[in-house]
Amino acid sequence: MSLPTEIMVSKSKVPVFAIMLLAMIFVVGLFVVGYDQGHIFSVVLGEQAYEDLYIHELTHDMRHAAGFPCH
């Protein structure tokens, strides 16, 4: 005698909050890698941050790989 079998399909939606959070992380990351020229550290270091460019130098090769010119 065979027993009936059921296949249950679970359809779960990705929460909108998770998508928005990931989008914000992406935008902040894009700014840091692509456009930061001392702006983030200028809050703490003042005008010296625009000369030192710590994040620019840290992400320099990543900027070129992503297609951002920086020279």
Image (cartoon, rainbow, N blue to C red):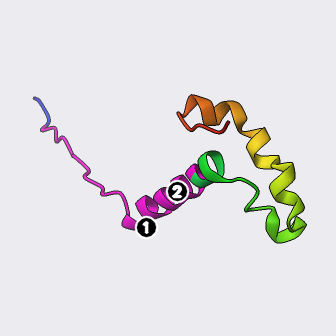
At x 56%, y 38%, the residue is 68
Q: Which mark is residue 30?
A: none
- Left or right: residue 3 compared with residue 12: left
How dense is the environment of label 2, judged by Cα within 10 Å: few (below 14), some, or many (20 and up)? few
Q: Which mark is residue 27?
A: 2
Instruction: State the quadrant of the C terminus.
Output: top right
At x 16%, y 42%, the residue is 6
Instruction: State the quadrant of the N terminus.
Output: top left
Regarding mark 1 in the picture, which secondary structure is present there? Answer: helix
| Residue 66 place in picture, x, y as percent | 54, 34
Q: Is residue 13 magenta?
A: yes
Among numbered discs 2 and 1, the one appearing first in the sequence: 1
What range of the chain is rendered magenta?
4-30
Q: Amino acid at mark 2?
A: Val
- Left or right: residue 32 compared with residue 9: right
Pointer 1 residue: 17
At x 87%, y 50%, the residue is 52
Residue farthest toward the front in the current orientation of the protein: 71
| Residue 25 place in picture, x, y as percent | 56, 57
Q: How many marks?
A: 2
- Viewer-nearest residue: 44 or 46: 46
Q: Nearer the viewer, mark 2 or mark 1?
A: 2
Q: Amino acid at mark 1?
A: Phe
Question: Mark 2 and mark 1: span between their CA atoms?
Answer: 15 Å
- Viewer-nearest residue: 54 or 69: 69
Query: Is mark 2 in CB contact (under 8 Å) with mark 1?
Result: no
